[in-house]
Amino acid sequence: MKNGFIFPDMPSFESRLTAAVWGQFLGDAAALGVHWIYDLKEMAARYRGGIRGFEKPVPGHYHAGKESGDQTHYGDAALLLLESLAACGGLFREADFAVRLAGFFGSPVCHSYLDKATRGMLARLAENPDNFQNGPEDDQMSSVSRLSLVVVSYAQKPVEEMLEAIRALTRVTQNHPTALGCAVAHAILLRELLEGRPFAEAFERTRKSIHVSCDGSDYFEFAHMQRHFDVVVATEVLGQGCSLSQSMPAALHAACHHPDDFTTAILATLRAGGDSAGRACMIGAWMGALHGMEGIPQEWLLRLRGRERIQKALDQLYARLGIEWPPKQDDAEAEDADDAMNAPSAGAGVIEIEGDADGDGD
């Protein structure tokens, strides 16, 4: 029993898939309030109690107006992708996703941040509305922050088919060799983890994969070279910025440095500053795939303000893919679960949450 659910000793394939999805959304939401704070002294002064995740953005922040538990613009776009995949039977259709993306971010009432890749996509769609593979030459984290959803949808298909979908997803908002190369590397690493390999083995297999470019392989090497430094120091060396040449190795380093615990890995990259939300999206997906739903903190799930919408889309996607989660229990397991849930205390592993489940303090 863990977090109120019955799990086997090792995460099942379905558990890993599900945790990769939730892990991506959780990493993003946890970073909301500290996202794009580069000065660590400023961060420490603003949050004197330390960074614990799900900080509310202050007035003047890039995400001001959002509440604790909301998604950044990365997560907003990822949810549109999840709903697109569910509507299209688990297949990536660039036209469907691009129309959803343009409809949301192009709306005059949209309050989500418009990053360079999305602005460029909107401009190019205005000029050529029928070309959904015409993203700008952007090398930041637009695509890698959401692509775990495509990897999950294609996890039971040949790797070449998955990578074709990953490249198509990337080209909606980014036509840059670094963006395409890092998207492939991220996808291959996540697939290795979904297949149940330990992080170090998955890391090495991805680095040597025939599908990963030389630049992509170099980012794994850069992360490995900083292995003796903590995440704050290594991120300062590798770069806090949005560019994938900085963010990819920094995210890889944080995951390598803290492979044993989801929360620790996410908080470590948040405390390193900069484009922490983009890095946390990748790390959250990797750690979710590594540890399964067993490793996802229930108290964090309860803080996601969009969790019902995410769950609805995920249920629809799984119905189309024939994936069953949570697993059905036999009569004996159901009786054991009922006994545990009705226990007088949380000592059996059921986490009690006090206060507002949305985490917004109201």
Image (cartoon, rainbow, N blue to C red):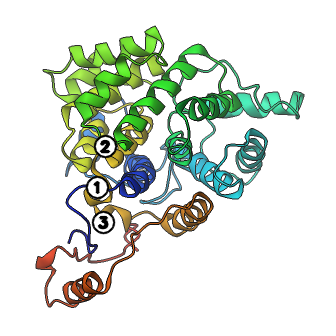
Q: Is residue 328 above or below residue 204?
A: below
For marks 2 and 3 on the same chain, the one whose residue lies earlier in the sequence: 2
Give the secondary structure at mark 3: helix
Give the number of the disc on residue 11: 1
Which residue has dot 3 on it?
298
Q: Looking at this view, is 121 or 216 the one in front?
A: 216
* Residue 239 seen in the figure: no
Give the secondary structure at mark 2: loop
Q: How many marks?
A: 3
Displayed quadrant of residue 260:
top left
Q: Looking at this view, is 238 or 310 the one in front?
A: 310
Q: Looking at this view, is 38 or 236 the one in front?
A: 236
Q: CA distance from mark 2 to mark 3?
A: 22 Å
Give the number of the disc on residue 128: none
Q: Which residue is pictured at 40% across the width and 24% down the height?
A: 248
**Type of amino acid under label 2:** Gly
Q: Which residue is pictured at 33% across the width and 18% down the height?
A: 220
Which residue has dot 2 on it?
196
Where residue 1 appears, x then y in whole percent? 20, 72
For marks 2 and 1 on the same chain, the one whose residue lies earlier in the sequence: 1
Query: Within 10 angstroms of label 3, few (less than 14), some, or many (20 or more) residues?
Result: some
CB within 8 Å, label 2 to label 1 = yes
For marks 1 and 3 on the same chain, the one whose residue lies earlier in the sequence: 1
Displayed quadrant of residue 87:
bottom right
